[in-house]
Image: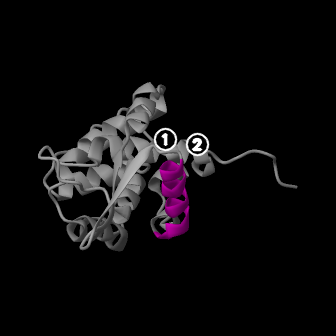
Amino acid sequence: MKLPFVEPDDDIYLNISVVLILIYYLSSTKRGVLKMNNERIHLYEYLVRNPQKLSYVLCQLGKGNLIINREDYSVSAISYNLDPLFDRDRMKYILTILSQKKLVCVSYKSKEGFMYSLTDSGMKMVEELEGEYFSEIKLYAQQLVSTLSINISQLNSSLNQIITIGVV
């Protein structure tokens, strides 16, 4: 018998909120260059949900060390569940919802693909998100701002090293 509850990681509203936070903080550089495409959103979402891996990636890229406010010894924090990294349909679904609700602006660049930024409604929604979990996700997203200058292949390479050598 299966218990009738939704696993938090599968909650669509939680996932939408996390993606909104990422786009809020990471959609563009200080100079206004759009940076958030599907691949970058996907990678950043995985990292903010796995703070130990995020800390290792930041350290490896020479972007400082993440200060983690809590000790997290949960199975999901130390396991190598890579399924979220390859679940493109879930991210496509989230981005479709955000677009339909007019929370994101979508533009297209020939080399990078679709680029995302928030509308005023999307920004307002992120600013209204409260709670410890969302505060942590916002902190992690702010830590990732320093990686906007790094190309996606370098980010993938750094994450790949965690996976192949089994660190974290």
Residue in the foreground of this view, choosing between 118 and 76: 118
Residue 13's label in the rendered image is 2
Q: Amino acid at mark 2?
A: Tyr
Q: Residue 164: x and y, percent?
A: 34, 74
Which range is magenta? 86-100
Q: Is residue 66 visible?
A: no
Q: Amino acid at mark 1?
A: Ser
Residue, x 36% and y 50% (percent of image)? 52
Residue, x 70% and y 46% (percent of image)? 6
Residue, x 31% and y 71% (percent of image)? 160
* Quarter location, residue 60: bottom left
Q: Residue 25: x and y, percent?
A: 29, 41
Residue 17's label in the rendered image is 1
Residue, x 41% and y 51% (percent of image)? 50
Residue in the foreground of this view, choosing between 63 and 79: 63
Q: Are marks 1 and 2 in contact (CB under 8 Å)?
A: yes
Residue in the foreground of this view, choosing between 116 and 77: 116
The alpha-carbon separation of the residues under discs 1 and 2 comes to: 6 Å
Q: Is residue 135 visible?
A: yes
Q: Is residue 29 left or right of residue 165?
A: left
Magenta-colored stretch includes residue 141: no
Q: Is residue 126 above or below residue 110?
A: above
